Amino acid sequence: MAIAGVPERIRGYGHVKLANVATANARQSELLARWRGVEVRMLRRDDAGHDSATAS
């Protein structure tokens, strides 16, 4: 059911909507990966601006 609710999070106009689309796409990918049983790895930026892979 959570996957079906992802589009409801896309609101706003312009840059606000674009940010919400990016967040919704990431959430959809995470939920689909869990549904498929795949480990989800995300890139996170540390305080120095470097990317590091972390499992969630």
Image (cartoon, rainbow, N blue to C red):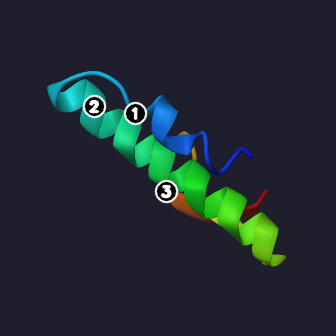
Give the residue at x 59% y 62%: 29
- Please determine whether, in this image, residue 54 is positioned above or below residue 47: below
Which element is circle 1 on? loop
The image position of residue 48, as x and y in percent, is: 49, 45
Q: Is residue 14 left or right of residue 20?
A: left
Mark 2 to mark 3 CA distance (whole Å): 26 Å
**Which amino acid does the dot numbered 1 rest on?**
Ile
Q: Is residue 20 left or right of residue 39?
A: left
Q: Residues within 10 Å of mark 1 (few under 14, many from 20)?
A: some
Find residue 51 and name its label: none
Q: Which residue is mark 2?
A: 17
Hey, which quadrant is residue 6 in on the image? top right
Q: Quadrant of the C terminus?
A: bottom right
Q: How many marks?
A: 3
Mark 2 to mark 1 CA distance (whole Å): 6 Å
The image position of residue 19, as x and y in percent, is: 33, 36
Q: Are marks 2 and 3 in contact (CB under 8 Å)?
A: no
Q: Is residue 27 left or right of residue 24?
A: right
Ranked by sequence position, the earlier of labels 1 and 3 is 1
Q: Are marks 2 and 1 in contact (CB under 8 Å)?
A: yes
Give the residue at x 39% y 35%: 20
The image position of residue 49, as x and y in percent, is: 45, 48
Query: Foreground: 6 or 54?
Result: 6
Q: Which residue is mark 1?
A: 10
Frontmost of labels 1 and 3 is 1
- Asked if one can make out residue 43 in the rendered structure from this viewpoint, the answer is no
Q: Which residue is mark 3?
A: 50
The image position of residue 46, as x and y in percent, is: 57, 46
**Which amino acid does the dot numbered 2 rest on?**
Lys
